[in-house]
Image (cartoon, helix red, strand yellow):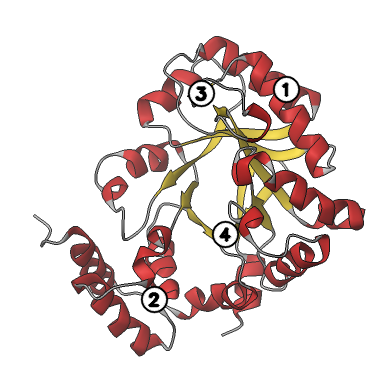
Amino acid sequence: MDTLGDFAADRVRIAEGLSLSRLVYGMWRLGDDADISAGHVRAKIDAALDRGITTLDQADIYGDYTAEAILGQAFKADPGLRNRVELVTKCGIVAPCGRYADAACKHYDTSAAHITASVEKSLRDLGADHIDLLLIHRPDPLMDPHETGAALDGLIRSGKIRAAGVSNFRPWDVELLQAAMRNTLVTNQIELSLARPQPFADGDLAFHQRRGDPVMAWSPLGGGSLMRGDTALTRRMDALAGEFGVDRAAIAVAFLLRHPATILPVLGTNSLVRIAAIPDARKVDLTRVQWFQLYEAALGREVA
């Protein structure tokens, strides 16, 4: 099987003239690497591109508000690189670290002023003239949907972002913001994996399937928990991994890809070896029974 060809061809359209790769390279750990040089960051991006993974997932808060600038150094070293990838980033969290070290407490800010300032700072840090997809990072209890919606619409109209979406929103949060916008919210990035299977039954996935939205899945390996330990779930994963000649990570990703909702796993790693192995998920073609065996092991019980 030509895994590169499969992933290079497997694009997900999210807006007019904009598509993402089915697998997304998550960069929340970019600043944790011992080597954050532009050359090493470029090596990781090249490893992803070589495997058909063109979408990079960022957030202003990653690396205590440093990860975007670290990525930006690679773009500034080779300006042509920016045109080979899609940039996803997020805003709306104010944590007492980095540029917000003086904040009295961690909080959310979805005001128009904060969103606009965050986008301008992200563009400067990234060395980019636009962001492909901007997500509101967390639902904000104090969000004024008309103010937030108008800010997002305005950023799309200005060309500073090409599309807008949300992250960690429940269906009612999405509906509240969407009702105040001209443009469509194109995705919701949620925590979804064999370690957190609740969205398969709590209505979150069904809501987005009905809307026709692709869903981005953060922490598809359960924050690494699916790669460790000896449980009924990991034993089931190991059995399937042996059958398909892959590792647990490939099984975890294939589980998400098998679902009829268009799920885009966001895989975060600083390991070039791990990046190289990401396409192994395409070697796994789970049957319905195999999918349910994993699902029941994740639930810890038989389905009703």
Identify the residue position indicated by label 2 in the image: 248
Dividing the picture into quadrants, the one containing residue 160 is top right
Q: Nearer the viewer, residue 216 or 195?
A: 195
Q: CA distance from mark 1 to mark 4?
A: 30 Å
Q: Nearer the viewer, mark 3 or mark 2?
A: 3
Q: Quadrant of the N terminus?
A: bottom right
Regarding mark 4 in the picture, which secondary structure is present there?
Answer: loop
Q: CA distance from mark 3 to mark 2?
A: 35 Å
Question: Which circle's residue, 1 or 4, is located before the other in the chain?
Answer: 4
Residue drawn at (79%, 36%) of the image: 123
Q: CA distance from mark 3 to mark 1?
A: 14 Å
Question: Which circle's residue, 4 or 2, is located before the other in the chain?
Answer: 4
Q: Nearer the viewer, mark 1 or mark 4?
A: 1
Q: Nearer the viewer, residue 277 or 64?
A: 64
Q: CA distance from mark 2 to mark 1?
A: 41 Å
Three-letter code, disc 3: Tyr
Identify the residue position indicated by label 4 in the image: 22
Q: Quadrant of the C terminus?
A: bottom left
Callout 4–callout 3 Cβ contact below 8 Å = no
Identify the residue position indicated by label 1 in the image: 117
